């Protein structure tokens, strides 16, 4: 790569650092379709939503006043003083939070690790271009001995199974979603869509998909009936169920995506245009944009997700903990783009990797005779197609394309796509249906498309200059990155597309400089192996030692067995062998969770959490009162007796449950939120918060109370001395008094949290222990499915008698028999 070319490749990141608006994009509508439609739901209802606390209401008002929505579905963020104050604390907290023990640096080198053979489920939503990289990744991971299941839209069942990968349908029609996205390109839905109920239908679709994603982790294969229980999850962010399924099953999660979704100072969020930097640095504004977009998204999803979590016997997620959950938990992420287009930002930690583009194996393809004859009858044509985009007026688009082709005197291959582009026969133009880009792009001079990641990557890999015509959301990403690399002109939004600028774009693509730049990028991309790098990234971040069975080193542990102070981790196969041998009993096995995920709210300040707890309790009581009048009318409108009976049942429900809700909300949740808020108060002035782990039951509650009391008092006294000393050392007299002020504030917060914590932590621990007594359905289901899987694998007889004897002897040796 030449020096000039290297500078152009770096231009995109440099422009982000200079604070200029950059448009980032992801494979067509696809994966972001679900995200953006829910985002619209959030903004359409945000003014009417009942806030759970004053701070939340303040942030909603600030976001409304500071955030605008452009016609193509992007967010314009005005970083003003108030908005900066509301989210600056979030920026500080997220940069230092690491909760999941998945860092490769804490594990043994990859070459010395045993290769675990895992059941891996891949959660993916989107169009074909989104799903194909996951099929390619799954096919590659089959070679490592894993069993792979892809959970996605029913449309992709055949292509997935043809690759040797199990498939689990989760519903949802990407074609309908694409049509909805094009009709509603902004984040706010049109009045027509609201009146038709499109937003609520999309929310209902997401709720159903969440349940089916969970089933994909534990249910039998819908075709073969073969048992399956996931040992790990790979997912793209818009599938939404990933972190909650991983928490319920206690298994590792690895995110894979083709657009940036992690806070960075290098460039803003792909859906954000930042318009003002008068109160904060550009880098901080870029970083904040991710938190703002995530927070707004959460407002449209929190009720759906918490309902889903209840069905999994999980605690609800407070509104303060929902946004940026993946970032705060330090979930490993692999981004699938070439580092020669977008280098890895320097502030991304080690658990985030860039693998390169993921390409599938080129399918066997024999071109139709008319296409083969057309390609061989003249100079290389220009490819024009918009894939899964559903255009409102395909006739107008076709006319613009044909006029531009005629004006530039080029030959063209026009893909009909989901919009069914087409027109009268024209010399030098051929219309085609589905055709593998891997084959076709070897025979064209340039490509023009909507900005799909798969299409863009395939075009660049084949050295094709590219013009992107984005439609909505983040699709300008590839247009901007390709233009910055010199491999194409600036993107032209589809609403601005006409004969003249499309003609200019075609001429730009066919110029010698553009062709040369595309060839250089092609050579670089061909040197990468994105699918191998992505598989290696997944393997690197697995907690191998934690997951490994103590008896079968290539299997993942599913059970623990304790006796006489000894503990052993067992895979489903090893456990079944020992049960059949009589070495242990099934009832003594305990489910093993190799990755315990903590989504506890990280409250900052003593006001927000307690206020939220009280308001949530009040809302619950009003809901019970509302049901007294609503339920009778809903349950039976024709039978008077049933109406009266339903009303009496609602009254009994209110009388029985309202005291419990009042006690839990006022005496337990309020106290716990107050203690957590007081413990988090020092974060407001830059101090780190001590992480005690996850509070799951009454024993954890008493442990937390002791830790909070002991360390709280010590920190309070030390802070009262150290803050003034440090302030005076660095800033003189002014620093001394500033430090004294912070020391006094921290002393008050620590003393109060330590004292109240003696009651609050045991209370919340007891509350959660009681709650678990009535939430055992998910645990029982996991247990039954693990036992079923063990019996199935044991019946297949993959282990010899000699190996069984060795396993049993090793078990007795560990247990001290």
Image (spheres, rainbow, N blue to C red):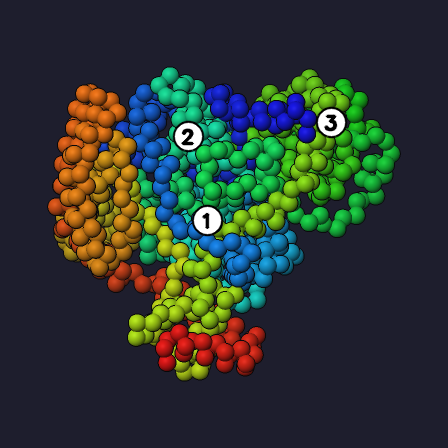
Determine the residue positioned at 50% across, 78% down.
Answer: 806
Residue 115, percent from left and from top: 54, 61
Q: Specify whether residue 764 is in view.
A: no
For the C terminus, the quadrant is bottom left
Q: Which mark is residue 105?
A: 1
Which of the marked residues, 2 or 3, is nearer the chain's N terminus?
A: 2
719 relative position to 225: left or right:
left
Asked if the residue at tag 1 contacts the one at tag 2, i.e. Cβ–Cβ closer than 8 Å, the answer is no
Q: CA distance from mark 3 to mark 1?
A: 42 Å
Would residue 89 appear left or right of 188 to someone viewing this image? left
**Viewer-nearest residue: 326 or 71:** 326
Q: In which quadrant of the rendered image does the N terminus lie?
A: top right
Of label 2 and label 1, which has the lower sequence position?
1
Q: N-terminal of the two: label 3 or label 1? A: 1
> How many neighbours does mark 1 have within 10 angstroms: few (below 14), some (14-19), or many (20 or more)?
few
**Residue 181 image point, x, y percent:** 52, 35
Measured along the vertical axis of the image, is residue 807 above or below residue 141? below
Which mark is drawn over residue 515? 3
562 is higher (above) or lower (below) than 448:
below
Q: Position of residue 543 (x, y in %)?
A: 45, 55
Q: Residue at x 58, y 62 (%)?
A: 145
Disc 3 versus disc 1: nearer the observer: 1
Secondary structure of residue under mark 3: helix
Q: Please give the residue where the numbered disc 2 appears in the rendered image.
A: 287
Residue 488 picture quarter: top right
Q: Position of residue 636 (x, y in %)?
A: 28, 54
Horizontal side, residue 330 vs residue 539: left or right: left
Return the residue nearer the eye: 78 or 589.
589
Mark 2 touches mark 3? (CB < 8 Å):
no
- Crowdedness of circle 3 by 10 Å Cα count: few (<14), some, many (20+)? many
Mark 2 vs mark 1, CA separation in Å: 25 Å
Q: In terms of secondary structure, where does tag 1 sit?
A: helix
């Amino acid at each position: 790569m030449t020096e000039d070319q290297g500078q152009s490749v770096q231009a995109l990141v440099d422009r982000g650092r200079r604070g200029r608006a950059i448009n980032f994009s992801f494979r067509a509508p696809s994966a972001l379709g679900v995200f953006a439609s829910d985002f619209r739901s959030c903004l359409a209802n945000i003014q009417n939503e009942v806030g759970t606390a004053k701070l939340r209401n303040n942030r909603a008002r600030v976001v409304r006043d500071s955030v605008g929505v452009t016609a193509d579905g992007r967010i314009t963020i005005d970083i003003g003083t108030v908005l900066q104050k509301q989210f600056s604390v979030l920026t500080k907290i997220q940069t230092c939070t690491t909760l999941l023990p998945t860092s490769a640096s804490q594990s043994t080198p990859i070459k010395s690790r045993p290769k675990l053979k895992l059941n891996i489920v891949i959660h993916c939503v989107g169009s074909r271009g989104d799903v194909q990289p996951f099929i390619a990744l799954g096919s590659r991971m089959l070679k490592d001995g894993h069993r792979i299941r892809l959970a996605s839209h029913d449309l992709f069942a055949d292509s997935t199974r043809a690759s040797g990968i199990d498939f689990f349908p989760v519903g949802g029609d990407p074609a309908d979603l694409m049509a909805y996205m094009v009709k509603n390109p902004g984040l706010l839905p049109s009045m027509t869509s609201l009146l038709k109920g499109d937003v609520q239908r999309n929310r209902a679709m997401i709720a159903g998909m969440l349940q089916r994603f969970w089933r994909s982790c534990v249910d039998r294969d819908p075709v073969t009936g073969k048992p399956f229980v996931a040992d790990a999850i790979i997912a793209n962010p818009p599938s939404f169920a990933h972190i909650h399924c991983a928490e319920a099953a206690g298994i590792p999660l690895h995110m894979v995506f083709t657009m940036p979704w992690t806070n960075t100072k290098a460039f803003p969020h792909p859906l954000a245009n930042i318009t003002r930097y008068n109160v904060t640095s550009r880098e901080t504004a870029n970083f904040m944009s991710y938190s703002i977009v995530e927070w707004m998204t959460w407002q449209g999803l929190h009720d759906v997700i918490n309902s889903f979590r209840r069905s999994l016997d999980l605690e609800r997620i407070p509104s303060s903990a929902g946004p940026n959950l993946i970032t705060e938990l330090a979930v490993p992420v692999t981004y699938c783009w070439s580092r020669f287009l977008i280098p890895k930002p320097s502030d991304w930690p080690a658990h985030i990797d860039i693998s390169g583009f993921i390409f599938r194996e080129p399918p066997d393809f024999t071109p139709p005779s008319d296409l083969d004859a057309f390609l061989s009858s003249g100079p290389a044509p220009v490819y024009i197609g918009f894939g899964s985009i559903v255009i409102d007026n395909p006739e107008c688009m076709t006319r613009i394309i044909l006029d531009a082709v005629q004006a530039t005197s080029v030959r063209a291959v026009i893909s009909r796509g989901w919009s069914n582009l087409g027109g009268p026969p024209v010399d030098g133009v051929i219309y085609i249906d589905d055709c593998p880009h891997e084959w076709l792009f070897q025979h064209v001079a340039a490509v023009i498309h909507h900005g799909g990641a798969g299409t863009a990557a395939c075009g660049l890999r084949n050295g094709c200059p590219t013009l992107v015509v984005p439609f909505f959301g983040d699709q300008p990403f590839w247009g901007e990155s390709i233009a910055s690399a010199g491999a194409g002109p600036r993107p032209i939004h589809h609403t601005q597309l006409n004969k003249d600028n499309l003609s200019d774009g075609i001429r730009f693509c066919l110029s010698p400089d553009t062709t040369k730049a595309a060839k250089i990028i092609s050579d670089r991309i061909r040197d990468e192996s994105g699918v191998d790098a992505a598989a290696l990234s997944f393997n690197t971040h697995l907690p191998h030692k934690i997951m490994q069975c103590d008896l079968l080193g290539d299997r993942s542990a599913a059970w623990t067995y304790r006796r006489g102070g000894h503990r052993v981790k067992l895979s489903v196969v090893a456990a079944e062998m020992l049960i059949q041998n009589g070495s242990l009993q099934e009832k003594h096995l305990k489910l093993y969770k190799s990755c315990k995920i903590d989504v506890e709210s990280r409250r900052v300040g003593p006001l927000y959490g307690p206020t939220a707890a009280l308001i949530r309790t009040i809302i619950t009581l009003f809901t019970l009162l509302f049901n007294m009048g609503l339920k009778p009318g809903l349950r039976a409108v024709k039978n008077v007796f049933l109406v009266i009976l339903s009303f009496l049942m609602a009254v009994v429900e209110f009388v029985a449950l309202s005291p419990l809700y009042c006690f839990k909300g006022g005496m337990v949740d309020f106290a716990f939120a107050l203690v957590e808020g007081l413990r988090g108060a020092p974060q407001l002035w830059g101090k780190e918060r001590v992480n005690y782990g996850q509070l799951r039951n009454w024993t954890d509650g008493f442990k937390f109370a002791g830790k909070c009391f002991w360390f709280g008092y010590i920190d309070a006294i030390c802070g009262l001395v150290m803050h003034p000393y440090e302030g005076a050392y660095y800033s003189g007299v002014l620093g001394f008094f500033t430090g004294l002020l912070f020391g006094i504030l921290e002393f008050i917060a620590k003393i109060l949290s330590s004292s109240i914590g003696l009651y609050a932590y045991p209370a919340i621990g007891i509350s959660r222990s009681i709650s678990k007594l009535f939430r055992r359905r998910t645990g029982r289901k996991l247990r039954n499915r693990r036992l079923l899987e063990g019996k199935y694998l044991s019946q297949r007889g993959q282990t010899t008698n000699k190996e069984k004897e060795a396993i049993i002897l090793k078990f007795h040796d560990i247990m001290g028999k």
